Image: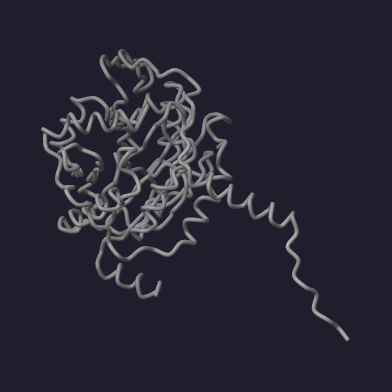
Amino acid sequence: MATASPTITTSSSTSESKERSAEHAAMREDVFPKPIRRKRQLGKVSLVIDEGQTTEVLGITYGLAHEIRAPGYRARVFLDCYNRRLKVLSYQARDYDAMIEKFRFLADANRFDKIWVQATANDWELFLAHGYILEGLLKYANRGSTVFMVSRFGSQRRLQSRTLMKEIRLIEEILERPRKTKPKTLPAGYVLDYAREEDVGGMLELYRRVFETYPSPLTYKEYLLSNLHREAIFRVIRNGKGQVVAAASADLDPQRLSAELTDCATHPDERGKGLMSILLAALESDLRRLQYVCAYTLARAPSYGMNAAFHALGYEFNGRMINNCDIYGDFEDMNLWVKDLRPHRGKRRRRLDA
């Protein structure tokens, strides 16, 4: 007669369980990289803008917006010297080969080792024959249509991510978690508000505390002041003493009716209170009032907290940009999260998730 074998808990299984618990704990810890190089001096920058044409920029310079016009194409690009990349923001082309070759020339001439193009559904595959790879999608980001994030790398070092496997496991764990439908509430005495000029000092202190380096001049007063008066919405949370303890913004693109949620920071002593989720939900409400279609973000791939916050708010994971920008003195991968803000789409997703 067959008998059932008793369940025996061995020391090896206990050890494996402890190892898994330790792995999950390490995954949730937001570990910042140690800078592998000194911060670049940005007082004087020389940039090649075309064959035989160079411009010199003085002062705090992170990059230069530039428009390219040629018989077979036109493009709007950002020469991002701080992050050593060429960002192609928009383009119109009949001669794709000539345009793509121009992008390569500008990257090589300025010693950038990444080109990042926001391509369309009709032409993104044309870039593949020129060494580009598809890194992710921004669904809904162009008036409801998908934007395809294709990139070309100029060096093996920029192409390879040292932390990719950890980031994949982090996303897998987050996506297995149920989404939270109950909104967070502000702690007693805290205030949610639009950022005002008198908040700039507190915002600078917050950003300088949270970020050792950042891919835009966010830690400079003049830049932050100018941002408050351009096409962006800044939200802050103040504690009972009136101090800015969390901040985030929506960078508006009125042509595409989409906005990037960015500049997200919470004071280390204030984490765990759901402040960032409250800020992001408020910015979404602002965008809906403006009849925007899409909100998206590029979240630090190693950050469990930021990625978990966007997942909990109903954002869709759409890919990963490898070694995309310099935030803590080293290049970091950035995860793409996208949300359709149209009410009927949101209702349909909730029914499917139920």
- Does 217 appear above or below 323? above
Q: Is residue 159 left or right of residue 352?
A: right
Which residue is at the far right? 1
Colouring rule applied to residues: one colour
Image location (x, y in percent) of residue 204 = 23, 29
Q: Residue at x 36, y 37 (%)?
A: 88
Q: Quadrant of residue 102?
A: top left
Q: Is residue 318 left or right of residue 159?
A: left
Can you say which quadrant of the picture contains the C terminus?
bottom left
Q: Nearer the viewer, residue 248 or 128?
A: 248
- Does 72 appear above or below 145? above
Q: Residue at x 30, y 16 (%)?
A: 55
Q: Quadrant of residue 121?
A: bottom left
Which residue is at the far bottom? 1
- Does 196 appear above or below 314? above
Total numbered labels: 0
Image location (x, y in percent) of residue 66 = 29, 29
Q: Residue at x 11, y 33 (%)?
A: 197
Q: Residue at x 18, y 34 (%)?
A: 227
- Does 304 appear above or below 229? below
Image location (x, y in percent) of residue 53 = 33, 17
Q: Nearer the viewer, residue 251 or 69?
A: 251
Image location (x, y in percent) of residue 269 = 32, 39
